[in-house]
Image: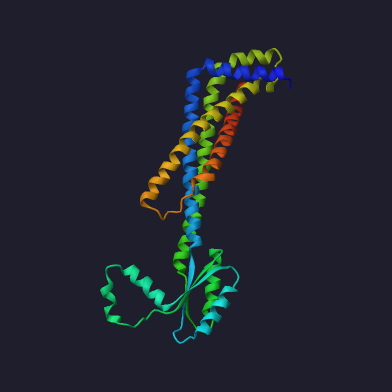
Amino acid sequence: MKIRTWEYFIREVFVSLKRNSWMTFASISTVALSLLILGLFLIIVLNLNNMATSLESQVQINVYLKDELSDKKMEDIGQKIKKLPGVEEIKFVSKKEAMERFKERLGDQQTLLTALGESNPLPNAFEVKLRAPEQVKAAANLINEYEGVENAKFGQDIIDQLFELTKMIRIFGFIIIVFLALATIFIISNTIRLTVFARRKEIGIMKYVGATDWFIRWPFLMEGMVLGLLGSAVATFILRNSYGAVVAKIYDTLTFLPLIPEQPFLNNVSILMVVVGTAIGALGSTISLKRFMKV
């Protein structure tokens, strides 16, 4: 295609945008709002997914040892556990350390320990973390068979509920994002359709004088891409400036929440938003033109 033809297409796009300035403003605003909602849900879903992954990674097996074991025997059990497939980290927790943790949890209610005196009923234990939460049950069953192990607990009910929760978050998030993307395509296609409808006679004349379908389509296609690009740029600007402030506010009160850091997360989301916005603009234009190209 000749450079002169591309110049004509680009000129037609900007002439159309300027000629229909109010419609252009309304279109960009509509696209920006649609993509802002889409981007907002995308960020929420990705953060929920990150939280779910973080919770999964914190699942561990607590291996409680029998009291009469020697230091050598406890070390041997630790080595056997470390060699199990999928074990990422193992930490020994002595009776003394377990009691100190228990006291910290009690806080001001230390008087509850008065009846124990100097005795310490808590066992020595290992805390075992695995690479994949799915490996926890099998590993716990194996460890329970070791000589000298009193019990290996990992909270089966909590694990099952956690898996169900994370599965629902991912499925629901995917459905919401797809739904919002389709809604955005619908809005953009209808917005472009108004522009095409206003120029339907011009399109008919161009068809009658021999203009090819693609020659007629390109300006509208590019116009849709420009609207999608500008709308996504506005939405991206708002999201980038809002995310950091919201994260800072949340961390002021809920420091334990594993939210995704701003960088490179925001850069990746920004690029995705611009690409999606431009692509949706082109798709919306293509859908709108089908009816009016039949002359």
Q: Which residue is located at x 47 percent, y 36 percent?
A: 36
The outermost residue toward the right is 1
Q: Quadrant of the N terminus?
A: top right
Q: Which residue is located at x 56 percent, y 63 percent?
A: 132
Looking at the image, how many numbered discs can be counted on the residues? 0
Viewer-nearest residue: 89 or 195: 89
Can you say whether 111 is above or below 43 in the image? Answer: below
Can you say whether 27 is above or below 77 in the image? Answer: above
Picture colour scheme:
rainbow
Q: Which residue is located at x 48 percent, y 64 percent?
A: 160
Which of the 4 image quadrants contains residue 139?
A: bottom right
The x and y percentages for residue 44 are 46, 46
Which of the 4 image quadrants contains residue 207?
A: top right
Q: Give left or right: position of 245 versus 175.
A: left
Viewer-nearest residue: 30 or 5: 5
Q: Give left or right: position of 14 versus 150.
A: right
Can you say whether 184 is above or below 56 in the image? Answer: above
The x and y percentages for residue 205 are 64, 12
The x and y percentages for residue 261 are 49, 48
Q: Quadrant of the C terminus?
A: top right
Viewer-nearest residue: 286 or 272: 272
Q: Can residue 145 be seen from the camera position used here?
A: no
Q: Can residue 250 be seen from the camera position used here?
A: yes
Q: Which residue is located at x 45 percent, y 67 percent?
A: 157
